[in-house]
């Protein structure tokens, strides 16, 4: 679910909802609704998220799909989410050779 990916991305970077909302030009309550899945994110806002966190939009969507795919897997998503975020950061820096993060996602 994209909502969970957005929330995990924000919390991984230790940014408060109010700060991120201000930087994205939306209200904190709207951000809260996006992260809870009560509202659907627009492509423009998804692009803004990608730009803000300096990751490709496709990587953010991949991360979201990976969370959905692994949902039934005994709540191990926390470790998977952290590994995926680490990998997304590495991709954003242009370094995609992080075996530990890649192995954690593919397990």
Image: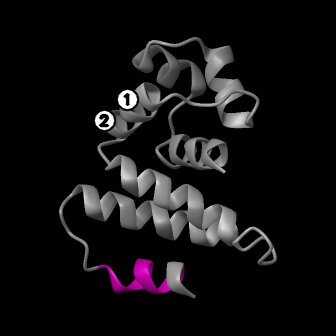
Q: Residues within 10 Å of mark 2 (few under 14, many from 20)?
A: few
Q: Is residue 32 magenta?
A: no
Q: Which mark is residue 97?
A: none
Q: Is residue 39 left or right of residue 91?
A: right
**Tags 2 and 1 in contact by the CB under 8 Å rule?**
yes
Choose between 71 and 54: the one closer to the eye: 71
Rendered position, 86 above or below 15: below
87 over 39 or under it: above or below: below
Name the dominant secondary structure of the magenta segment. Answer: helix
In the image, residue 59 lies at what x, y percent?
A: 39, 57
Q: Residue at x 29, y 43 (%)?
A: 54
Identify the residue shown where x is 27% and y is 62%. Answer: 91
Query: Can you identify the residue that label 1 sits on?
Result: 48
Residue 61 in picture, x, y percent from top left: 48, 53
Residue carrying label 2: 51
Q: How far apart, in angstroms, are the residues tagged by discs 2 and 1?
A: 5 Å
Q: Callout 1: few (<14), some (14-19), or many (20+) C-alpha neighbours within 10 Å?
A: some
Callout 2: helix, strand or loop? helix
Residue at 66% in and 35% down: 35
Does residue 107 sit above or below 41 in this rendering? below
Q: Secondary structure at mark 1?
A: helix
Going 25% across and 73% down the picture, which residue do you hit? 96
Is residue 102 located in the magenta-colored stretch of the structure?
A: yes
Give the image location of residue 38, x and y in percent. 76, 29
The region drawn magenta spans 98-104
């Amino acid at each position: 679910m994209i909502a969970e990916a957005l929330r995990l991305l924000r919390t991984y970077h230790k940014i408060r909802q109010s700060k991120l909302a201000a930087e994205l030009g939306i209200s904190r309550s709207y951000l809260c609704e996006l992260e809870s899945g009560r509202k659907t994110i627009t492509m423009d806002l998804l692009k803004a998220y990608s730009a803000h966190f300096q990751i490709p939009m496709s990587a953010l969507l991949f991360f979201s799909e990976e969370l959905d795919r692994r949902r039934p897997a005994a709540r191990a998503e926390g470790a998977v989410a952290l590994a995926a975020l680490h990998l997304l950061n590495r991709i954003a820096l242009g370094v995609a050779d992080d075996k530990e993060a890649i192995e954690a996602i593919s397990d």
